[in-house]
Image (spheres, rainbow, N blue to C red):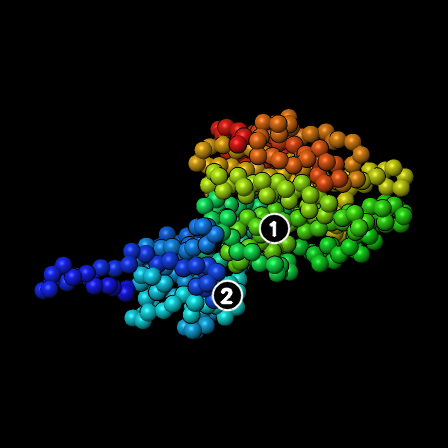
Amino acid sequence: MVPYSLCIAVLFCTLAWADECAWDRDVDFSENPPIIFDESFEIVRPVLEDNYRMVRVTAGSKLILDCPGTNITSLAVTTVEATCDGGRNLWIDDKTWEMKDLGCTAEAAATIRRNTGSCGSEDIGVIHIIGFEILGPESFYELIRVCFDPTSETTLYSQNVIKGRNIAAKDVDPNRPDFKTSSGFFTVSMSSVYSQNSQLNLMTELLGDSDLASQTINVSKEFYFAKGHLAPDADFVTVPEQDATYFYINAVPQWQAFNNGNWKYLEYATRDLAESHGDLTIFSGGWGVLQLNDINNNIVEIYLGLSEDQKVVPAPAVTWKVIHDEARQQAVAVVGVNNPHLTTAPTRLCDDLCDRLTWINFDISDLVHGFTYCCTVDDLRQAVPHVPDLGDVELLTE
């Protein structure tokens, strides 16, 4: 820790210490900064202060700098313990370091901790956790909790937390990584599932007519199935956290018109809400199977994968999001209909309360971009039993 002298008299001097370490996220870090954990194993994230994204810790604080999947270049180790030494300095093994000299050789990489429990109605799902190893495999930092149905090969819901104090200071990275499959979850090629050519061929087969298929899968109108993030990258603050969202088990097939429409606007509104409320726990999932009419006007269920004559990877009929403010014990459920080909409003799963929510600020009646409605969590849970039971909560209206 770097001291400065405080002399009360000629013969009496003491040492006073800088009371904190402070780093500008845009100036004082390397291209691939380590993930910083405090003594409680929580990530130390930036906070927006007058347009500066500042990272602050108290002098003397013990920190862990971690580069999961890679190394701290200058030290040739994955993880190191450090102490805030005041100003911009860290004390590591009897030596002072600047944060900018402690970058990772490559971007920190998330992993999946598998099979950690059961979830969903009647325990049909398996919990997998996306996060980071800290100090090796014995410690794990949870970012996203995924409830995955291995039979249908679909995610029932993902759970994450929006850090309200930090979200305005998040990293903005124009480069998006490819989605990662990870073995053992899907029996079909997920890159093929989300290929627009494959989707066109699938619709031709399912609907029985190539012209109808071309109307159904129309890229110019955003009529194709995109990887619909459940816990989206923009809900997270640092680039390693954001890139950790790019696993196929954290996505369901959403029409791009919906994904880039009202679902996106709901995500925006939820993050704005977190800025004013503080931390929000988010559950996002799919329900049901999308149905379309074939050339003979028969109803066809849309699954994007076929594995040994078993239909897998369903396109959900709806996707839902539960927003829970645990501190205030308030929550609400919002449902978006995953079908841009609707011509009339569909039947709702629960009574619509959107007019009571001041923060819903987009066109919820837009059929092409995602017909949307809002409910109490209990009301939605009656229709969608995978929705978690939050107990006695008030409606999150503003």
Compare residues 97 and 316 and report the one nearer the observer.
97
Instruction: Specify the amino acid type for callout 2.
Output: Asn
Give x and y (percent) for residue 187.
Answer: 69, 56
Which residue has dot 1 on it? 250
- Residue drawn at the location 72% of the way across and 36% of the way down: 366
Residue situated furthest left in the rendering: 11
User: Between tags 2 and 1, which lies in front?
Assistant: 2
Figure check: 288 above or below 201: above
Mark 1 lies on a secondary structure that is helix
Query: Whole-Å distance between the Cαs marked 2 and 1?
Result: 24 Å
Residue 32 lies, in percent from the top left, at: 50, 65
**In the current view of this chain or complex, which residue is farthest to the front?**
10
Could one spot residue 379 in this view of the protein? no
The answer to whether residue 59 is above or below residue 338 is below
Quickly name the residue at label 2: 32
**Residue 171, percent from left and from top:** 53, 56
The residue sitting at 52% across, 68% down in the picture is 106
Q: Residue at x 49, y 29 (%)?
A: 393
